[in-house]
Image (cartoon, rainbow, N blue to C red):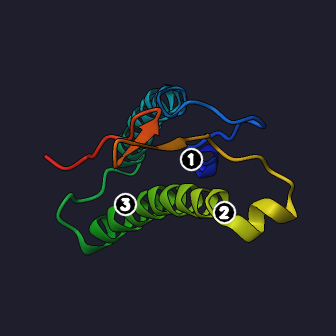
Amino acid sequence: MQGWEEPLFERKMRPSFPDDLSQTHDSLIMPRLEDIRNQGKEIHKALKDTFDHIKPDKKSAIWADYVAYVNTLVIEGITKSIVSSMSFLSDQINIPYNKHHNYPPIFDIRVDLQDREVIFDPTIKSNKK
């Protein structure tokens, strides 16, 4: 689960188009999701192997506590992954942080006023449905 702490965002050292940034982000999600699934299968197999070797009563408090302990470790791993990504993203949109590290903008958006209407290039779309 250590690898889960890598942020799910990648910053280029040059401005990108919003669509390119979205594609890069999407390309990072699927491998991470697959890794989490595979490691989940490994954890499940390890639990099953442990159960098969020690043959505890499935309903015993000790076995239930052990399974709860393993579940807690998995939840902590997922939580650390989320916190890591959110912290990294927070830094990337923090203007003083970017100025301190001499980072360029993540992407450039041009704003024009045309016929009393504000126009963004590239277009900014709303996520509202």
Q: Position of residue 59 (x, y in %)?
A: 17, 64
Hey, what amino acid is under mark 1?
Trp
Q: Where is residue 43 in the image (x, y as percent from the top left)?
A: 43, 43
Residue at mark 2: 91
The image quarter containing residue 11 is: top right
First in sequence: mark 1 vs mark 3:
1
Rendered view: 114 above or below 16: below
Q: Nearer the viewer, residue 59 or 18?
A: 18
Q: Which residue lies furthest to the front in this view?
A: 115
Q: Nearer the viewer, mark 3 or mark 2?
A: 2
Q: What crowding class fits label 3: few (fewer than 14 Cα within 10 Å), some (14-19), or many (20 or more)?
A: few
Q: Which residue is drawn at 49% across and 43% down?
A: 112
> Tag 3: residue type?
Asn
Which residue has dot 3 on it? 71
Residue at 53% across / 31% down in the picture? 28
Q: Are marks 1 and 3 in contact (CB under 8 Å)?
A: no
**Residue that badge 1 annotates:** 4
The CA distance from mark 1 to mark 2 is 19 Å
Residue lying at 27% horizontally and 67% vertically, measured from the top left: 64
Residue 13, percent across and down?
78, 37
Three-letter residue code for mark 2: Asp
Q: Locate residue 33 relative to residue 105 in the image: left or right.
A: left
